[in-house]
Image (cartoon, rainbow, N blue to C red):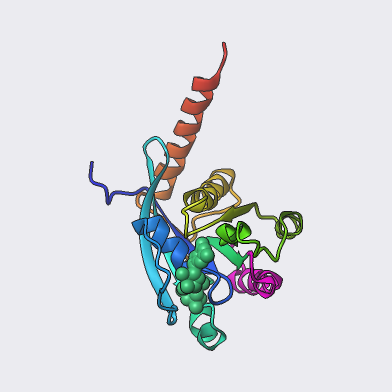
Amino acid sequence: MDLTLWQYQFRIIMLGDSTVGKSSILKRYTEDLFLECINQTIGVDFYVHFLEVEPGVRVKLQFWDTAGQERFRSVTRSYYRNSVGGLLVFDLGNRKSFENVQQWHAEVSERVQPYTVLFVLVGHKSDRDKAGERAVNRTEAEKLASQLGAPYIEASAKTGHNVKEAIDLLTRRVYQGLKSGEIQLREGWDGVKSSGPTAQMSQKIQNNETAQKNKSCAC
Ligand SMILES: Nc1nc2c(ncn2[C@@H]2O[C@H](COP(=O)(O)OP(=O)(O)OP(=O)(O)O)[C@@H](O)[C@H]2O)c(=O)[nH]1
Ligand SMILES: [Mg+2]
C-alpha cells in the first residue's frame, strides 16, 4: 500500500505559551525523539504524520507548530483560520501557562469563525510530577477543560507518556465531528480536505459505520 495515500487531511494547530513543550510533543510523536535542548520555534514549523482512524480510512495530519513567544503572534495568528483541531498545551509545572490557556482558546475560537476548531487540553511535562514540581492539579485542569468543552489528558514528551494518546484523541474527535456534521468540508477552507469527491467520501464513512454497526450487532 502507498503510505502517502489518504482520504482526509486534518490541519492541527499547536497552541500554548513558549517552552510548554509543543515542539517536543511533535518531535516525540513523529520521530520518537526527545531533546533536552531544542530550538525555540521561530514563527511556525510544519510536521506531517499519517493515522488510520478506522480500517481503510487514512488521515494525513498536518501540524502547524506555532511559536509561543508573543513577538511571533502576528505570524502565528494567520494559521488559526485554516485549522480544524487545536492541541492546547500548558506546562504542569508552570502556573502562568495554565492561566493563559483560556486566552489561547478565545483567540483561536474567535478568529476561526465561521468554522469550528475542536480542542484537546494537554497538561504537559507530567514527568515533573514525580520531581514534586506540579503547580496545577488535575481537578482544576479538568474543570477548565470542561468549561472549554475539551477532553483533558496529561502527557510527557520526555518519557513519551500519553503523547500518541493525546494526538489520537484529537484526531478521533475531529473525525467524529466530521461524521456527526459538527465539522463540514467547505470550499475555501483548508481545515479539512478530502482526497475524493465529498459525496463519495461521505458515502464511505456511512458504509464504514454500517459495517461497524453490523459487526457489533448481537442478532
Ligand atoms: N521535563 C520535561 N521537559 C520537557 C518536556 N517537553 C519539553 N521539555 C523541555 O521544555 C523546553 C521547551 O520545549 P519546546 O518543545 O521547545 O517548547 P515550545 O512550546 O515548542 O516552545 P516555543 O517554540 O518557544 O513556543 C525544552 O528544554 C524541552 O527539553 C517534558 O515532557 N518534560
Ligand atoms: Mg516550539
Q: Quadrant of residue 57?
A: top left
Question: Which residue does the image show at 35% across and 52% down from the upper left?
Answer: 195
Residue 128 can be seen, yes or no: yes
Is residue 104 covered in magenta?
yes
Residue 82 can be seen, yes or no: no
Residue at far front of view:
131
Q: Residue 1's x, y, as percent?
A: 23, 41
Give the main secondary structure of the magenta stretch.
Answer: helix
Region rendered in magenta: 92-119
Q: Is residue 141 above or below residue 110?
A: above
Q: Which residue is nearer to you in this view: 146 or 55? A: 146
Q: Residue 218's x, y, as percent?
A: 57, 14
Q: Which residue is nearer to you in this view: 198 or 66? A: 66
Q: Residue 7's x, y, as percent?
A: 37, 48
Question: Which residue does the image show at 44% across and 68% down from the upper left?
Answer: 64
The answer to whether 63 appears left or right of 149 in the picture is: left
Is residue 85 covered in magenta?
no
Q: Quadrant of residue 125?
A: bottom right
Residue at far bottom of view:
71
The answer to whether 95 appears left or right of 209 in the picture is: right
The answer to whether 4 appears left or right of 59 in the picture is: left
Q: Which residue is nearer to you in this view: 60 or 168? A: 168
Q: Residue 26's x, y, as percent?
A: 43, 62
The answer to whether 112 appears left or right of 41 in the picture is: right
